Structures are given as structure tokens and as C-alpha cells.
Image (cartoon, rainbow, N blue to C red):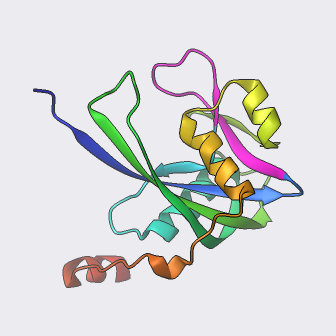
Amino acid sequence: MTAWTPHVTVATVVEKDGRYLFVEEHTEGVVHTVFNQPAGHVEYGETLVQAAIRETLEETGHDVKIDHLLGVYTYTPPMFPDRTYYRFCFLAHSIGYNPDAELDTGITGIAWMNLDELQASARARSPLVIKAVEDALAGKQFPLSLIYEHFSPSLTSHLDA
């Protein structure tokens, strides 16, 4: 029996003038680069919102304000059936940009595209990338208060350090 591994990830959908912010990146098991929302794993001691802000900055140079929860998505990649990604996707807007920021390893650049351009590229990292833009365009959004995160006292003292 294969061990199953859950992964908690976050992503941000950042829209400006009808276009969405994507990272172009290398990904495991794929020859060419792919497009993804700024996204990544939640690190020890982070809230979901903190992780989304950090990942967006590290991958794009954009500092963002998180506005709403777009949705919670799951994905099990066909080539890795022992992994399931739980993706908390947020709507955000850019509040600052550093064009000289050093981007995370594996990121080759950023791109602003509309849904048609993303689909025409045929390089969305997963079906979740397209689904998130479709949901944003459909006006889906939920208040951030939908998320309640309770940290134990020992973790809270770690966060204050």
C-alpha cells in the first residue's frame, strides 16, 4: 500500500485591468515551463493568509493585500496518486511591486494574462489554475472570517519570537 501524503497549499488570484498575475515556473515531471498562480506550501507557524502573502511576494515581487477567500480546492496529480493538494485560494490585489526582487528558485518570470491567453498557452500547471480564474470571473468570493485558525499556546509563543 502506498503512503498517502496531504499537502496544504495556498494560492492568490491577483487581477488588474482584466488580466491575472501568473508565475512561469519549472515543475517536477514536466519538460517545459508552466503557468501557475503565485502559490506554495504553508510553513510551520503561518496562518493561511500569511502564507499567501509570503508566497506571492517570494514568487512575483508583488506585495499583496488579501481581500477574500476564493475557494478551497483539492487536486491529486495523475503522475503522483499518493499526493493530494488542499489549496486555499485567495483573491488579492497588489499594493506594491519590486521589479528587482529575486524570485524563488524555479520561477523564470511573471506574466499577466487573461483566461483566454492562459487557456491558449496550454501550460496551466494544473486544472486548478484555470478553475480559480473561472471562479474569480464568476464573482465567487467568501469572507476571510470563514477561516478560523486556532494555534496552541506553544505555537503562539513561537509566532511571537
Q: Residue at x 57, y 14 (%)?
A: 31
Q: Is residue 125 visible?
A: yes
Q: Quadrant of residue 66?
A: bottom right
Where are the magenta residues, as a range? 19-35
Residue at the extreme top? 31
In front here: 141 or 112? 141
In front here: 149 or 73? 73
Magenta includes 55?
A: no
Q: Residue at x 62, y 18 (%)?
A: 32
For this view, does 145 lie left or right of residue 116? left
Q: Position of residue 58 (x, y in %)?
A: 60, 53
Q: Is residue 154 above or below residue 132?
A: below
Q: Position of residue 75 (x, y in %)?
A: 42, 40
Q: Residue at x 67, y 41 (%)?
A: 23
Residue at the extreme front? 138
Report the number of numbered marks.
0
Q: Is residue 152 above or below residue 82?
A: below
Q: Is residue 35 above or below residue 102?
A: above
Q: Quadrant of residue 35?
A: top right
Q: Position of residue 147 (x, y in %)?
A: 43, 75
In front here: 20 or 53? 20
For this view, does 28 lie left or right of residue 81? right
Q: Is residue 5 above or below residue 45?
A: above
Q: Position of residue 49 (x, y in %)?
A: 51, 69
